[in-house]
Amino acid sequence: MWREIYRFFIVLEKYRWWILGTAFGIGFVGGIYVYGWIYQVGFSALIYTVQLFVADVKTFGDLSIVSSLEDAPADAWKIYIPATFAQIFLFFGLVLLFFKSQVARLHHWLSIKRGDHTLVIGLGRNSRFFIDSELESKQPSNIVVVEKDPNNPYIKHYQDQAVSVIIDDTANRLERLNIAKCREIFISTGNDQENILISLKILKDAQKDMQKKLVIHIEDRTLRSLYVDEGLFRADMMDVEPFSFYQQSARELFQEHPIVGDGDDLIQSTQPFGVVAVGKTPLAVEILFEAIKVAQLPNENKLHLYFIDQDAEAFERYIRYHMPYYEQLPNTVLHFIGLDKDQNSFYADTVWKNEILKHIILCHEESVDNVRIATQLKGFTYTNPREGFTTPKIHIATYHKSQIAEEVKRYNTEQTKGVYAFAEAKEICNRKNLLHSELNRLAKIVHRGYTLKAEGYKPEALLVSQKIICRTWESHALINDRKASFAQALHINTKLKTLGLTRVPSPIAVKALAAANREVLREALEPSFQTLGVKGKTLGEVFEELKANAFFPEQYQTIFEKLLRAEHNRWMAILISMGNRYDEKAKNYKGKDKERKLRKIHHLLKPLEAFTEESEKRYILNDIYAVFYIPEYLAQIGYAMVRNT
């Protein structure tokens, strides 16, 4: 209720000069007319009219020509009309002049006091897009913004929309922001280090298990690695999730446009495939990190990543700085090509005509450069493709230039077909992606499955309430422990594609949906089970028999065996991307995962074919869980598994 009252006050304040001018004009003209025409008191009419605006309202009972109320003329009530407008002028003039800041402070206090508010710290670019998306939604949340720079040009803009914007240093106001009762917190000041410092202070003062979402904008991958991978953020206080605009943009790209293309031909073959990233930017780095999470295929198809910029050597150093051991990535080859986008030779290079290309991703910081390159590629390089050549998809990073993204979508005609906009701020910085993403929910249930691996195959243990799932997620203090769950969640679509399956939303209850999904998965794997001699059994029975017989893939002839190999390769790619390397000595740290992580070594960072010891082969159970638990993972987020038509 108060929000609506304050919004009404903002509207009045916005049109204050119209309101005050109208009230003054009608009051003054009306006063002259009533006093002068009706009562005919001459020059005194002007004096009486002026008194209307200084709270000394002269009514007919005060006039010298009228001795008493009974002697008043029949139309004496008209004096109240100019008096009312004069009082409106006086009231709003005083409120807007003397009490505007007090009304704003009251709005801030009430917004925080009642709780259930979304706390946004900083009016950086990403937080502004988030606030805009909230204001455009049907049910916007109660947003409280804290911005320490009084000269930020966007403060007035959001105050005019009834958003509670507090101008203060967060460090000075932290205890007064009612964090214990807020709904969620999004920190994006425009400075990564400042975001981190504020987050650490919030976590230091937070009570254990506050069941609250804390999203921290950290764009610099080095800082994310330092504070997140090394465990300086503790996740047992809140549901802490670092956010990177570039990372989320790359992730969304490969979710909407599968890295292997739209069809199933590639995934059923052994043919290599390629992706081009143009521009030495942070976005190009995130393209690499996200690509390797989804590109591990059952037939071990080689992924060729081409990084193009004017200075190829500088680009290679830039990539190696973020991923030192990229040569060890399974089934992945990186190429660095020096081409100047401002020269015709750029568009005539043979790389664009490579038949294995699936995607060309334009990552320059200036979206205009990306549009120009895409236009030249479509208008010059791909005007007359040779017979049998399929033009790769071209993706333009538009960032905050939403009008460019709209134009790309609007004019995606036959001439520009195959050109897509991505990394659009309005699509990335919203509640769905920042606070309650489907991927986040999926990663949480995957994480619970990971924690249950010591108990064997227990699908019913995954069909629990969201509260229990969140408790499992939050009980692990190191955020780094969760990254594997996100990567595994992203790879589920690749596994489904391998099996000729897809996922569709379903209204069926979770337990019934999980049972139906298990049956679909069993049918898809039945040919493999027949080859392995475990046909006609449920997934649970298959698991127990495989475990009892110490199963380990040998020939990799069945889809099931290939899926296990792909899952292991995906796990290797993630650890290598985080700076880990193979070291046989790591097996001596049995039961000492923390020591292995500190040294960033692992004795299993090698192909499954190189597993020779029985103790190593037992780890194949983890890969089986990753396949067998897919029905429960998808059921928990409301998806049914169905065969592709």
Image (spheres, rainbow, N blue to C red):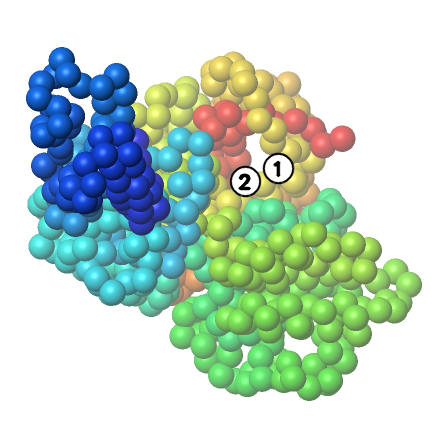
How busy is the neighbourhood of tag 2: few (under 14 within 10 Å), some, or many (20 plus)? many
Image coordinates of residue 355 in percent, x first then y, are 78, 65
Q: Is residue 95 left or right of residue 400?
A: left
Image coordinates of residue 19 in percent, x first then y, are 31, 42
Specify the quadrant of the image occupied by residue 377: bottom right
Image coordinates of residue 339 in percent, x first then y, are 64, 83
Q: Are marks 1 and 2 in contact (CB under 8 Å)?
A: yes
Q: Is residue 319 left or right of residue 537?
A: left
The front one of 228 and 62 is 62
The front one of 554 and 288 is 288
The front one of 15 and 387 is 15
Question: What residue is at 24 percent from the left and 49 percent from the top?
Answer: 165
Residue tagged by mark 2?
492
Above or below, comparing residue 76 to residue 436 in the picture: above
Amino acid type assigned to the residue bearing label 2 in the image: Ile
Q: Secondary structure at mark 2?
A: helix
